[in-house]
Each structure stands twice: as C-alpha cells, then as structure tokens.
Image (spheres, grey):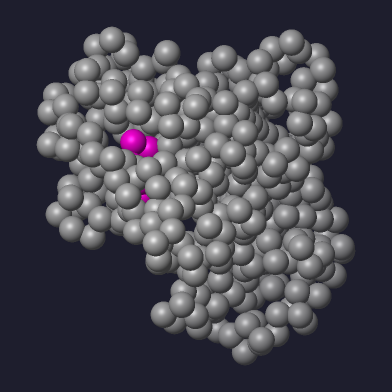
Amino acid sequence: MAKNRAVIGCQWGDEGKGKIVDLLASDADIIARAQGGANAGHTIWIGDEKHIFHLIPSGILHEDKRCYIGNGVVLDPFGLREELALLDDKGVAYDNRLFISAATNLVLPYHKLIDAVEEERRGTTSIGTTKRGIGPAYVDKIARNGIRLIDIFSPDRLLKRLEHQRSIKSEWLEGSTDERADINRTYHELVAMAEQLRPMTVDVSQHLNSAWRAGKSLLLEGAQGVMLDVDLGTYPFATSSNTTVGGLLTGLGLGPRVIDEVVGVAKAYTTRVGGGPFPTELVDAVGDKIRDNGDEFGATTGRPRRCGWLDLVLLRHAVRVSGIDSLALTKLDVLDAFDELKICIRYEQNGKTLSEIPLDLAELHGVTPVYETLPGWHEETSGITDLTSLPDRARGYLDFIARDLSIPITIVSTGAKREETIVV
C-alpha cells in the first residue's frame, strides 16, 4: 500500500508547512486539509510567483492531484470564493479536483464581527486572534448551533437556522449598523453561492477511506502548530482546534492506521504571532535581525512575528504528543550571518529544571531558558540542495537537533522556492 503522510506544525504555526506539503504532494495522489480555517496562511513559491492559500490545500498547484477540505475545517465560503477566483486568474483548474466535506461548519460574517468585538473587550488580556471569526465559529459548532455547508443547499432550513442565530446573538447583532450583522444579506449571498459549491460538496471521509483502500497515497495537511492546540498548546493563547495528529484524523474522518509517517515541520529558530508566553523570544537587535532576514510577517495578518532562538523543549513536546517520525527544518538560510547560535535545551524556574513544557501557563511565563551555544557558519546556504554541500557547522546544527529529538531530519529548506530544498 502506498505511503501516507501527515504534516504537522511543531511550533506556533508559520513553520513553512505550505512549502513542505507542496514538495511532498508530488509523491501523493490526494492532499487533504483537516482543521483550522482562514486564519492559516500557507505560502508557496513556484519560480518567482508567490501563492498564498488560507483554505485550499497547498497541493492544488499540482494539476494531477485531488484536494479535500475536511469536516474539521471551519470554512469561510466568502474567503473560499476569493481563493477560487485567484485560481481562475492563474489558470489553475480545480473542477473535479477540489472537494469539501458536507459536514464542514461555516464561518459567516457575524462570526467575524463577534470575534472583533470580543477581542477588543479583552483589552490588555487579548489573545491575538486574527479576527477571522474562527473562534466564534468553533463555539457554534461545539454548542451545536453551527451552520454547515450542507445547509446552504436547503434555503428554508438555512433561513430557519440563520434566524436562530439572530436570536441567540442579539447581544452583538441587534441594533448594529455593521453590515456583518445583516442576517438577511448573509442568507441571500449564501443561496447565490450554493450552485458554485454544490459540485464540490461530498462526504470526505468516504472518499478518503475508499482511496486509501484502493491503494492511493494520502497527504494530510495540518494548519497552525502543536503549540497552538486548544488542549495541548499554550492555552488560552491557542487556536480553537486540535492541531496535533489527532485533530487530522477526526478532521478528515480517518482511522489511525491510515497514517504511515508523521512529518513535523519546524523553523531553524522560533516565531509566534499574537500574545502568550515565548521563553526564547529576543526583544533586541538579534530578534530584529532574524525577523528581517526571515521576512517574518504573517501571511494572514501581515503582523510582524515575534522571533527567538530554537526551543527544543517545545519540539520535544510536539514530537511526543503527535508521534512525529521525522522532521522538516525550514529557513536554515536565515541563520547564515550569525556569529553564534543558541538552542534552548531546558528551562529553569525557582531552582527547578524543566525539560518538558508545563501545561500551566503560570509556570511557563516564569521560566528562564538554558541555552547551548553553537558556532555560526558565516557561509551562504541559500539554494543548497545537497546535504554534503552544507557548511560543516550547519550540519552540526542539524545533528544537534536530531540527536536531542531522537528523530531524523529528512528535509531541510534553504530558501522559499520549491527547488531550494535538501531531501535526505
């Protein structure tokens, strides 16, 4: 049976999963997105052309692949329509190639309104949401008030469910002049969109399981990263879904035996967007240099990312909770110009040594990172495609990480473009 891979972010998202999924898609028949929503931004460079996807799986640029959006995703149909229009403009065909689960819950305009209002109310305790309506949509899903894709094909049922939304969300919607509060407008726009989305709407679980049993190769695409998992990440500074491998399975309706390999993706350093603890953050010239060299600005929000040294305590946690088999390390070339590099190997707090992430943020906020210092290589690695061509010190950096995590590094990204990659 063909090899099936799951791709998981190992940090706070933005690890470069889009490029890795695009790279691995050449060996797969099917690429499937499992969770999250338009708060994810996967950037892919093909030659000198930049592509950013928020909802559509990164494998869509391979014209012979089928792509699926699973039930675990919260789908912004208006955002999807924009992405489809971009594919049309680029001449990328998606008919009979892109499919969406009928059970996918929708992110609607009032979710974005609520998201913005609630984030403003939090004030200094804000969690750094993208204001894309993801959290409120997942709240509706869990409260069993959500509107699913299948509902838009039954106008009477859709209207009834939207009227229910008007009644239970009166705190935010009643009297609002914001067009996102206009339930009637949302209803008519969804009905008008229904015929475009109907051919794409399927039972993704059945499709994927049938393909697996027929020997097809599956590539499962995660969004965000393990440290944003709503259960196992830095809660409440987290996303609203399970970003670990378990979230991929439930988000696509698959059993665990489908996955043959879990590929973790991590940057050669650490970044995060929004609030929350970040033990290795560098609020100095070194952090600024990493941000500038790495062009660390969010694909979804445009916000500058917080930057810091690589944190092996975080990566050990990700490897453990998602059963990571191998690591893809991205943006190695960003570190080319540093005299020395630091890697966090443990934390210290009140005389205690911590080699694993504490789930209690009260503990994580107060930790001091303990670093191992390695020499920089001061040679250009950008565009290198062969491991033996890397500087000795760069290979030493990779070896240090692999030894600590007890998993191999099988992919090293040395630039943004697809071809700027070392595959071991």
Q: Main secondary structure of the magenta part?
A: strand
Instruction: Name the residue nearer the viewer: 201 or 215.
Output: 215
The vertical placement of 211 against 237, above or below, is: above
Instruction: Return the residue nearer the eye: 405 or 272.
Output: 405
Whether residue 278 can be seen here: no
On screen, residue 155 versus residue 39, left or right, reads right
In the image, residue 281 lies at what x, y percent? 31, 56
Percent coordinates x, y for residue 361 in the rendering:
51, 65
Tell me, yes or no, if residue 114 can be seen here.
yes
From the image, which quarter does the N terminus lie in?
top right
Q: Which residue reaches farthest front? A: 351
Asked if residue 247 is positioned above or below residue 213 in the image, the reply reads: below
Quadrant location, the C terminus: top left
> Considering only vertical position in the picture, is 122 above or below 19?
below
Q: To which quarter of the image does residue 388 belong?
A: top left
Q: x, y percentage for residue 320?
A: 59, 39
| Residue 115 in magenta stretch | no
Q: What residue is drawn where x is 64% and y is 82%?
A: 173
x and y percentages locating residue 96 in the rendered image: 69, 26
Relative placement, left or right, of 87 versus 293 is right
Asked whether 109 or 31 is in front, the reply is 31
Which residue is located at x 70 percent, y 72 percent? 184
Which residue sits at x=34%, y=59%?
Answer: 368
Q: Which residues are magenta?
A: 267-271
Quadrant of the image occupied by residue 306 = bottom left
Q: Is residue 386 left or right of residue 300?
A: left
Q: Total of numbered circles in the picture?
A: 0
